[in-house]
Image (cartoon, rainbow, N blue to C red):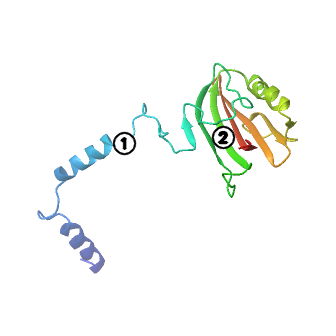
Amino acid sequence: MAPGLLLAAVVALGGCTASGPSAQDATPAVASAKASAPQPTETLLEVDGDEHSAVGSLPEGFPSDLLPVPEDAEILVSTLQPAEGAEPSTLSLTTLSLNLRSTLDAAALVESLREPLLAGGFAEATPTQAQPGLAAPTTFTRGGGEMLVVGGLDRDGVRTLTVGGRLSLGG
């Protein structure tokens, strides 16, 4: 027998001793690993979140006057926190996001935000080139570095709308 084949046979046979764990011993570990895997009905988002985010609702202080949630919409997750480097005691920028799902078409969703934002002194700018996969993308800006970016995904008759950016919430 060639030395390489002999070595392979010794290694293979060495793993078949009675002193090692049997296949029966491994079965409970595999079964318990499968039992702890997430089930399709479980949520992937933590319901408690952190102090700046909320799952299924708006965090305290969220500017719903500027970003009203359409009646038929389901809030997926939202956040509201001081912008990086901002001093909490001053009139500084706040970072926010809003993610919701709705059966309204993309134009109606954007329109539900357009009116209050324009009335609040924001200017709208639509992208000059199409953004693949996004329905009705647009940006709203206001002086002092305030900017909100709006975009939606359109899948199977349901829209997921995302708004993110920075606002001055004024103390």
Q: Which residue is mark 1?
A: 37
Front residue of 131 and 49: 49
What amino acid type should be assigned to the residue bearing mark 1?
Ala
Name the secondary structure under disc 1.
Answer: loop
- Single out the residue that lies furthest toward the left: 18
Residue 23 image offset from top left, x and y in percent: 19, 52
Check the picture and name the quadrant holding the N terminus: bottom left
Q: Nearer the viewer, mark 1 or mark 2?
A: 2
How far is mark 1 from mark 2, CA to CA?
30 Å
Q: Residue at x 27, y 47 (%)?
A: 30
Left or right of 41 on screen, residue 32:
left
Q: Residue at x 24, y 49 (%)?
A: 29
Q: Residue at x 69, y 21 (%)?
A: 104
- Find residue 167 and name its label: none
Residue 138 image offset from top left, x and y in percent: 80, 37
Q: Which residue is mark 2?
A: 97
Front residue of 102 and 62: 62
What amino acid type should be assigned to the residue bearing mark 2?
Ser
